[in-house]
Image (cartoon, rainbow, N blue to C red):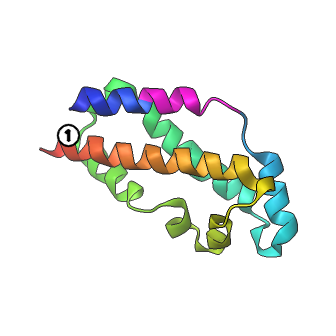
Amino acid sequence: MIDHWLAKLDALARADAGPFPYEACRAAQRDHVQFATLVPDLDAYLSELAGYRSWGKRILAWPDEKVEAVRRRLDESFYDRYPTYRDLQTASADRIALHEALERAERTRTILIQLIEQLRR
């Protein structure tokens, strides 16, 4: 089962190879003044998940403390961690790249949780 989750992470890494959704972020920022820090917040969140994902099979060698620390970090989705951006959940044509990046991030987060749950057994 662990190989299954690792393969899914690898596939997501390949799908996530495109550019950061700057234009979609700028469109969201034009519509909502409170989204002024969207780019750095989104970048930090996506980078954290991509960093965990990049470990690949080496995740299996993580010490228990790291597994637990990462699991705690994964408890929060982007919207949980940054509730200011909840209005982004409604799709609009000028934000498609942003929604796709967030969907890949959520799939990554979910798969990492599943993988960590397997490691904890």
Left or right of 53, for residue 7: left
Quadrant position of residue 104: top right
Residue at the spot 74% in from the left edge and 45% down from the top edge: 21
Question: Camera-side residue: 35 or 102?
Answer: 102
Question: Camera-side residue: 69 or 4?
Answer: 4
Q: Which residues are magenta?
A: 10-18
Residue 94 percent coordinates (x, y) = 81, 54
Compared with 103, 86 (above or below) is below
Residue 61 can be seen in this image = no
Compared with 12, 29 (above or below) is below
Residue at the spot 55% in from the left edge and 49% down from the top edge: 103
Residue 16 lies in the magenta stretch: yes
SS for callout 1 = helix
Mark 1 neighbour class, 10 Å CA radius: few under 14, some 14 to 19, many 20 or more: some
Left or right of 97, for residue 114: left
Name the residue type under label 1.
Leu
The dominant secondary structure in magenta is helix
Residue at the spot 69% in from the left edge and 51% down from the top edge: 98
Quadrant holding the C terminus: top left
Residue on which disc 1 sits: 119
Residue 105 percent coordinates (x, y) = 52, 47
Question: Camera-side residue: 114 or 62?
Answer: 114
